[in-house]
Image (tube, grey):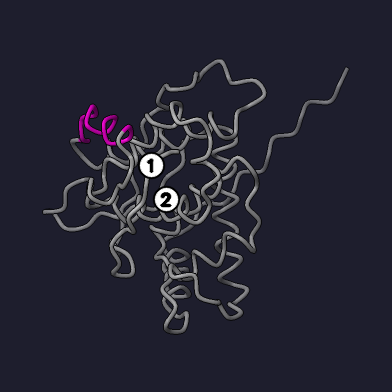
Amino acid sequence: MSEPTPKRRPADPFTDAELERLQQLLDALPAPLEPLDVSMADGYLCGVLLQPSIVPLEAWLPPLLDTEGRTVPRVSDELIALLKRRHRELNLAIVDRQWFDPWIFELDDEADPSETVLPWVAGFAHALDAHPALLALPEQPLLEPLAAIYLHLDPDDLEDADALLEEIESLEPPTDLEEAVEGLVSAVLMLADVSRPQKAAPAARQPGVRPPAGRPRTGAGRTGPGRSPPKRGGPR
């Protein structure tokens, strides 16, 4: 009788204090570097992990530490360790097609769902600009999940993306933050079905079906390093 396959050890979720520390370390990077904030970094790492081939640390770290592509000096081991830990946590969720809590923080009462998730979405889009292999895959399977993410952007930020814009126009915007967060997580897992297909998909979840709803994280809402999302195109 064969031994049962051991389960992967789950990643330890970040505490609020650890998230604060990560933001402090990013803020401490010297000028003129423009690092992503923690919410943008979370979306960025999801975009990195959805690439069809593994993106090594030395390729994904510099665009996170500076959005303008400048040479980054040596950074602290603590900062790298925290980012690698979140990278692993997200990777385990994506590989197993499991719900994860995006680092999305509530803003003031006047903010609508798209405004609240915009930093995360901008980070995700930055990843696809820096690592475009995902967008080189066949267009049709990407349209629905990409539209579910990019619907939170201003349409003027999407260039040469007629099919994507048409798909976005067919979607109903989320009515609240919980629905917006669920849509982002579902879209990430749907994209993983395209770019990182499982050898045998679990019977409980078929591609294109949303996972169970979860609760969005809440916190003290930072909105990024003060930059508008760069203009970008849709899938090619």
Residue drawn at the location 27% of the way across and 36% of the way down: 165
Q: Outermost residue, left direction? A: 110
Q: Which residues are magenta?
A: 163-174
Q: Secondary structure at mark 2?
A: helix
Mark 1 or mark 2: which comes first in sequence?
A: 2
Would you say 118 lies left or right of 86 here? left
Task: Report x, y in % for residue 81.
Answer: 61, 65
Type of amino acid at the residue the image marks with label 2: Phe
Residue drawn at the location 41% of the way across and 65% of the way down: 36
Task: Report x, y in % for residue 146.
Answer: 38, 37
Q: Secondary structure at mark 1?
A: loop
In the depicted structure, whether residue 157 falls above or below residue 161: below
* In this view, the mark in front (1 or 2): 1
Q: Nearer the viewer, residue 225 or 106?
A: 225
In the figure, residue 223 lies in which quadrant?
Answer: bottom left
Would you say 218 lies left or right of 9 here? left
Q: Quadrant of the C terminus?
A: top left
Name the residue carrying label 1: 234
Magenta stretch: residue 25 in it? no
Would you say 68 lies left or right of 1 here? left
In the figure, residue 82 lies in which quadrant?
Answer: bottom right
Type of amino acid at the residue the image marks with label 1: Gly
Would you say 90 lies left or right of 158 here? right
Task: Work out how far the residue at label 1 is from the one at label 2, CA to CA, in angstroms.
Answer: 13 Å
Name the residue carrying label 2: 124
Q: Quadrant of the N terminus?
A: top right
Q: Nearer the viewer, residue 130 or 221?
A: 130
* Circle 1 crowding by C-alpha within 10 Å: few under 14, some 14–19, many from 20: many
Q: Outermost residue, bottom direction? A: 31
